Amino acid sequence: MVPAQHGWPPGCTELVSTLAEGSPEASQVVRAPHWRRARGYTPAELSTRLGELMRQVGELGELGRAFSARHREDFSDPFSNALESTPAEQVSGLSRVIRIRTRDPSTAERLAHLLISTGLAESTHPVATLTTGDLEPDTLSQLPSMQPGGWAVRVIHGDEALDLEPGDPDVIVAVLDTGVDSSHPELHGKLVSGYDFVAIPDEDTNLIGDVKTPDPDTTDEAGHGTHVAGIIGARGKRMINGMGGDCRIMPVRVLGTTLENGARVGVGIITNIDDGLKYAVDRGADVINLSLGITASGPGIPHRRAVEYARLHDVIVVASSGNDGTSQPVFPGAVPGVITVGAITELGRVAAFSSWGPFLDVVAPGTAIYSADLGGGYRYRSGTSHAAPFVSGVAALIVARARRQGLTLRERTIRRIIRDTADRSDQRRADAWAGTGILNARDAILLTSNLIRNHLIRQRQQSWQDVSSAVLVLTA
C-alpha cells in the first residue's frame, strides 16, 4: 500500500507546515495565494520572520496557502484567491497551513527543522509521493460457484441491509482515489461532478498520463478508483449491487498513475489528498472514502487538519488500515476520528497483509473482491483498499436512513453504530487485529432504525408535555 519513509525523502524540495496558533504569520495565511498559483510569492512577503528563516537556509523560496478556501473569489475554481477564513477552517487549523517550495532538498529539510525549533510552526511534512499497490488475490480457485463477489456481501449481511434501506441518491460518497471511469455501465447515472487535484512534482519516468495539471477531468487511468467506486455504488448489472445502494459517487482524483512491476498503481502526495478532502467537504459530500495511506515522516500527524475539518461538518471519513501486515500506523487511517478498516478473507479470518493496531475500528471483506474495472470491464482485487468501501457504503445507508426521517446523525454517532454492531469472535470489545469485529451492515441499519424511533418517541412525548403545560397556564 505504501512504502515506509524514514528521514527526509530523497529529492524532496517542498514541505507543508502548520503555523503556530495565534502567531502573526498564521493570521496572514488567508491573504497568500494558493500554492498552485503562488509562483514568485516569497515567504518574506507573508512574514519578516519567515523571510529571515529563508535567508538562514540560503534562498528565497516560494510560499502559498496549502488549502483551497471555502469562501473564494471564484467558487468553480478551487485555487481562486480566498476572501476570508471560515470558523471551521480556523478551528481545524486549515487556515494556518502553508506550502513552501525550495530549490534543494537539503534546504527544505533544514527549513523544516528550523520552523519547528523556532516555534514558528506546530508541524511540518515533506511533500513526498505515495503509492497504492494492490495485492494479487491468491484464493480465486477456492471461491465457491456463485455470483462474483457474492461472498463479500453475504458475510457482512449486505443484501439484508439493502432490503431494509435501499439508499438515497441525495447521499454523496466522495471517492478520493485515481479517478473513476464515468463510462462504466455499473456507474452510469451514479456520478456527480468532481475534480482532479493531481500535480506531482516528481520527474519519475514511470508516471503515466495526467499527473501535472489539475482540472475537472477525473478520468481513471489506473482502475483502482473505479474498482472502489463499484463496491460502493454499482448498479448491479454484472456484479453485486454497490453497498451504498442508491447513493451517488463524487470522483475526486488525488492519485495519478505510475508503473510498478509492470502494473498500473496510484501515486500521489499528501497535499493533493488533503486538498481533495477539503474540496469534497465543501462540495457537500456526506461520506469520504480514502483507500490509500502513508506512514508518518516528520513531526505531527499527516491529514489531521483536513480530517478535523471534515468532522466539524459531520462528514464521515473512512480509510483503509494498510497492507503491511504490521502495527505501524498508516495515515489517514490512524488519524483520530477516521473509521479505519482492515481486511478479512473468504474464511472470515483477518488477512495476513491487513495492518492492525489500536487505531483499527472494524474489518470487512478484502480478498478477491469483484468490482468494476477500466473500459467497462471487471476484475478481482485484494487489499484493505477494497475493504474500506464496504464500510463507506454502509455509512451512506445510515445517512440515508436518518435523512428519510428528516434527521441528521453526528459523524461520531455513525462511527459508533458501525463499531457497536460489528460481529465479534469473542466477548472482548475490541482487539488489535480485528478492531471491534467484522462489519455487519444489517445490524447497523437496525440499530440506526431503533435510535431514530426512540428519538421520535421522545420528541412526541416532549411535545405533549409542552401542550399540557400550555393548557394548565391557559386554564389557571
Image (cartoon, grey):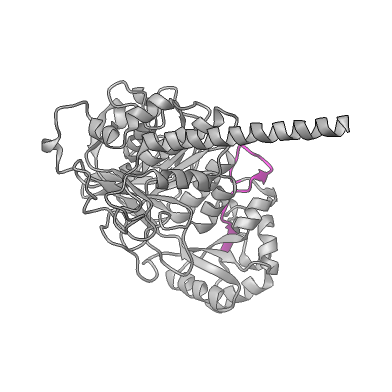
Mark count: 0
The residue most toward the left is: 141
Q: Give the image quarter of residue 256.
A: top left
Q: Nearer the viewer, residue 439 or 448?
A: 448
Q: Nearer the viewer, residue 456 or 327?
A: 456
- Residue 92 lies left or right of residue 422; in this view the side is right
Is residue 203 something that shows in the picture? no
What quarter of the picture does the C terminus occupy?
top right
- Residue 312 magenta-drawn? no
- Residue 71 magenta-drawn? yes
- Residue 145 lies left or right of residue 240; in this view the side is left
Q: Position of residue 423 (x, y in %)?
A: 32, 44
- Residue 241 lies left or right of residue 285; in this view the side is left
Q: Position of residue 268 (x, y in %)?
A: 40, 51
Is residue 381 something that shows in the picture? yes
Dominant SS in magenta: loop
Residue segment shown in magenta:
62-79
Q: Position of residue 462 (x, y in %)?
A: 68, 36
Query: Where 283 sits versus 120, above or below?
Result: above
Query: Where 335 sits versus 422, above or below?
Result: below
Query: Where 283 sits versus 471, above or below?
Result: below
What residue is shown at x 32% (from left), y 40% (from top)? Answer: 222
Q: Give the image quarter of residue 106.
A: bottom left
The residue most toward the front is: 476
What residue is shown at x 30% (from left), y 31% (from top)? Answer: 374
